[in-house]
Every structure is written in structure tokens, then in C-alpha cells.
Image: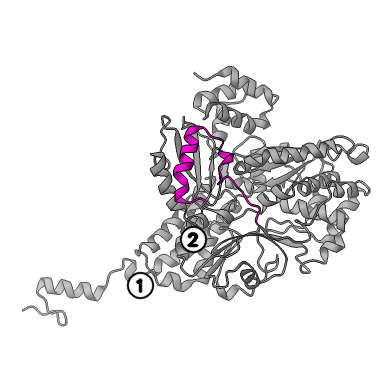
Amino acid sequence: MVDTDLIKRIVQQYGSDRSRLMDMARAVHAALGHISEEASAALAEALGVPLVEVRDMVSFYAFFSREAQAQNVVRLCHAAVERMQGADAIAAALESAAGTRFGANDPGADIALRYTSCIGLSDQGPSALVNGVPLTNLTADDIPGIVAAIRSGADLSKLPQASVDNDVRVAGPVIFASTERGAAVRKAVTMTPDEVIDEINTSRLRGRGGAGFPTAMKWRFCRDAKGEAHYVVCNADEGEPGTFKDRVILAQNPNLVFGGMTVAAYAVGAREGILYLRAEYEYMVPHLEGELAKRRHLGLLGTNICGREGFDFDIRIQLGAGAYICGEESALIESLEGKRGAPRARPPFPVQCGYLGQPTLVNNVETLCCAARILVNGGAWFAGIGTKDSTGTKLLSVSGDCEKPGVYELDYGITVRQLLEMVGAENAQAVQMGGPSGRCLAPKDYARTISFDDLPTGGSVMIFGPERDIIEVMRQFTAFFAEESCGWCTPCRAGTTLLEKGLEKILEGRATDRDLRELESLGLTVKTMSRCGLGQTAANPVLTTLRNFPDLYADRVRPDNGGVGIDLEKAEAEFHAIAGHAAATGETN
């Protein structure tokens, strides 16, 4: 019997606000260990919404369980880089020590084992989240002690493996330079909102998510859009495997992030800001709330900020619940409103009709940091860094087969080869630029530059040494997309699964030349026919390796021979031998 009074109190805690359903579901899950059908019904009744709305949302997110589960949940990162680092051996050690299997659902057990995609720790894997506590640089020898600590109820944050390094290898002048708390906001309020946007325009700042839309233009569109309220949303849902720069920024310099959000709010006329933080980073919440409290105390948030009459703005943190697609801005807005994170059709764009149907500015963590720094140092200063069309610096999360994984803040325009020399990976067989949704580069591409007009990237750089099986890595990437597809459109839902099956066929030695052609054709269909960015990029691992590594595929397939792989001459000879024919003449004895 579910405790309906508990659920009513949770609903009341959030003001019976339907848009806070995500928070309510998280609270119910934390209290009960799962969200059963009965709990969903009680939540729907207390909130006054149809049960299907709650059931639909809860079923979408990986961190919500609808069935009773063990009290302790170990989520082992099983992304490609972590498997290269030994995640499979960690998995075997966990199963042995815990006495259960990955994916098993035994509510009577004290530990449940789950695989999860990237948790933002590829620079220090193998890694895992245990009841939300990150454990890094795991070895198989560590596991018995960790399992014993879990079972004893020890404070896991005290374990020696519960150490997350920032790993800033190169600190540039924009993101990781020293920061005076509030400098950007104090500068902004001496200007008009239009002047702030003009300064951003002078910098030629482009969004750091990879697409590179001009930031000033986006801010102008939002400011000019009509609505009862305007909102600023910071997208901190970095779910792209191999990316961890936002984790480092938020740990090391949250002041710059919140400063950028406040400057943006001043420019577009927003009174409320939301930091959407991925569920995997929940352990960072106390640290971030502490910084917000300092800013409120100093008058950098709240009413009449920095003495500017009528400039009222504050920020709250919204935690997600485990869904890669929520990194897409319209899916993120849906999630913010307490729904499943399905991308919206466009137009209208979020700057016109976003959160709660109001004009909403969505920028990612790095973009907002750049904006704050531009206000302090000036747009012309920023435009003097990087290249003509790619100004400023870019944060790169480097992982894989290299001597120095970590975060690098580098000027735009650096070549791939220069980067590989810097990180200690001159013998790289391949470089995955931009995460699985990006492109796989061959050595012939290493003279290309990291910039919007050549190799745009959100920041993930995964390096594969000569001994890696590139096709197997691409299969893992494709399996990730098949798992993360929201299922809304057929090209993505079915296409990603078929792509994975095609790669499996190649890896098992059952494929022919025809399969390669069909795989490429399928990839192009998924890319062009899918509804949102996930499907439109899900085929990139296949398509870019087919183009850049044709020999790797050619070595794994057989000639077509009618598509069935049969040697006709050999088969004919065997037939004649059995029938007693003279193969050459067709005569009988």
C-alpha cells in the first residue's frame, strides 16, 4: 500500500505545480526506492492530472525504476572509452563480489548492478556511480572492498576511489582565467541591454554546442520576442559520451557560469533562470547551491541586482533523470516542464515559444562563461583570439589512448595533429571528434583545424590507438544511439537498431560487399529522414568510418556472390562429384 499522504506532501512541497513533476517524481523515487503504478496513480490524483501523463514521464527516464529494486544501485559506466580502460573486468569483479548479475532485478538483493552510458568521467575511468557517489580509476582489486563498504552502510564519499579530479591540462584566457565574483554583472548593469548584446555581437561569439549559431543573434531574438515572461536556461546536460568539460567548469568556476546567466537575463529581460543539470552530476548540487547562496548574499542575485532598480533575477537548479536526448534544447524544455524529453517540432523556436510557452534563451555552460568573460574584457578582446570565423577558445575533453587525458582550453584553429602531439597520442589510428554523433577522423585528416568552418565540435575528443578495433567501437556507438532513441520516429527507432545489426554482421564475418552498400544507404536514410538531432547524427559513426576507413571494412567482408557468399564454381564441382557427372562436359559415365 503506497503512502498517499507522503505523496500529497511532496506535491504540496512543489506548490502543486504541474511543471515541477520531475522534482516530484524524483522525491517519490527517493522516498520509496521506485515509482510503482500505484504511486504514479497517487501522484496523478494529488496533482490533478491524468495517470497517463505521470506514467508516460516516469517510463522515459533511465534513473526512474517502476519496480522495486535493491536498496543500493551501482551504475557502471560502459561507454567505449571506459571499456578500453577495463570496464568489462570491473563488471566481472562486481558480479562476483555482489553475487548478482548486471540487469538482474531482485528486490530481495542488497545490491543492483546496472550499466550506464557516459557519466562524464572518461578522463579517469573505469568509473561508476554508487547511490549517486562517483568512484573513479577503479581496478578489479578495489571491488571487494567497495562492495563491503556498500553493505556496511559506510559513507561512500569517504572511499579513496571517491575522488574526482578536474584534470585541467591547459588553462586558457577565457574559461579558466582567474575570475572576480560579480565582475561581469557589475559591468552589465552600467550598460543598456542593447549595449550588452552589441558587445556580444562584437565578439562574434558562437554557441559552443557545435552548431555555432551566433550568440548575439539568439539573444536579440529572445529579447524581441513577445511574452508574459522571459527565461534563461543553462544547458548542463552534457550526455555526449566522452564529454566532461561542463563537469570541470561547474566544479572549478561556477561563478562564471552564473555570471553569464545573469548577464543574459539582463540582456533579454528574464527574471528566472534554470540550470538544467544531468542526473549523473547530482553530487555537485551542494557545491553549486553554495555558490548561488554566496551570490544572493552579495546582491548578485535577487532584487535590484547590483543596485539596478527593477533588475530582479534568480536561478534554480533542475536535475534531470537520465536521458541523452535532453541535451537537445527543445527536449530539455519538455523535461523542464515535467514531461518526457521528446524534441519539439520547429518552428516556433525556443526563443519565441520555449519554457511554459514563453520566450526562452537556452545556452550551454561554455557559451555562458564566454559571455561573462566578454563583458569583463570586451568583445574586441575576445574576437582577437582564435580565427576570423571562430573566435575565442574551445574546451576539449580528451580521452582514450593518450598519455594526458583531461580538459584543454585552446584557441580555435589548432590542428588535430597539434592536439595529438600535445596530449601524447602521435600514433593515433583514429580520432572521434565531437563524440559518437561527430565524425571519425583518419590520419589523412590530422592537418585539419578545429573550428566552425572545418571541424566543429561540442568538445568530446576520443582517441583510438593502433590496436583498437574501430568497427567494434562504432558498433558500441551505434548501440548507444539505439538505446537512447526516444522512439518517436521510425527512421531513428528502427534505423539505429538495423545499423547496429549491420555492424554485428560485419564483425561476425557474415557480411558481403552488398551489406556495406546497404549499410551506407541505410545510414543516409536515417540521417536525412529522422526528426531530431539524435537520429540525424546517429549514423555518423558508420558513415564516416565507411568513408575514412574503407580498408577496415573491406578486410571483414566477402564478395557478393549473389549476396549469399557461395562459391559457385566450388559448389558446382561438389554437385558433379556427388552426381557422378563430368563437370566440364556434362557427360555421364
Q: Magenta stretch?
A: 138-167
Whether residue 233 is situated above or below residue 552 in the rendered picture: above
Q: Position of residue 35 (x, y in %)?
A: 53, 29
Residue 433 location, x and y as percent? 60, 63
Q: Is residue 19 above or below residue 381?
A: above
Percent coordinates x, y for residue 259 in the rendering: 81, 47
User: Which residue, given by chain and number where applicable, does mark 2 sit on?
Assistant: 474
| In magenta segment, residue 575 | no
Residue at figure coordinates x 70%, y 24% from the top left: 15
Q: Is residue 128 visible?
A: yes
Q: Residue furthest bottom?
A: 585
Q: Nearer the viewer, residue 548 or 423?
A: 423
Q: Which mark is residue 559?
A: 1
Residue 434 sits above or below residue 152 on the image: below
Q: Earlier in the sequence, mark 1 or mark 2?
A: 2
Image quadrant where one finds the C terminus: bottom left
Question: Is 105 on the left or on the right of 206, as rendered?
Answer: left
What kind of residue is marked 2?
A: Met
